[in-house]
Amino acid sequence: MDKDRIEGAAKQAKGAMKEAAGNLTGDAKLKAEGKFDKATGKVQSAVGAAKDKVRDAVDRH
């Protein structure tokens, strides 16, 4: 498993917590930061998944 997938998942979790805290406290900035962290985490996780697929394809040939 690529490290980007792991880091991406961690960013998504961190973002979800920030977003939830922003919702609870009414802090729009914290909520927005959480959404941003979740989005960047998803992208990073997708990049890691693509790297894994390329690595697997190369290993098979």
Image (tube, rainbow, N blue to C red):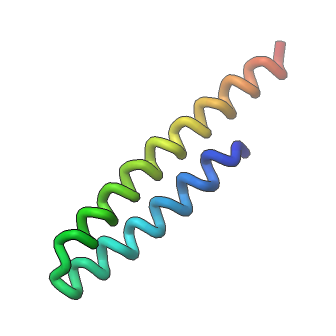
| x 69%, y 48%: residue | 3
The picture places residue 11, in percent across and down from the top left corner, at: 49, 60
- Quarter containing the C terminus: top right
Q: Farthest bottom residue? A: 25
| x 27%, y 72%: residue | 30
Among the 4 quarters of the image, the one containing residue 57: top right
Q: Farthest front residue? A: 29
Q: Is 32 in front, or is 53?
A: 32
| x 30%, y 81%: residue | 21
Among the 4 quarters of the image, the one containing residue 18: bottom left
Does 53 sit left or right of 12 as displayed? right
| x 54%, y 57%: residue | 9
Instruction: Establish if 3 lies above or below 57.
Output: below
Does 18 sit left or right of 24 as displayed? right
Q: Farthest top residue? A: 61
- Quarter containing the N terminus: top right
The picture places residue 45, in percent across and down from the top left corner, at: 54, 45
Among the 4 quarters of the image, the one containing residue 25: bottom left
Q: Is 2 in front, or is 22?
A: 22
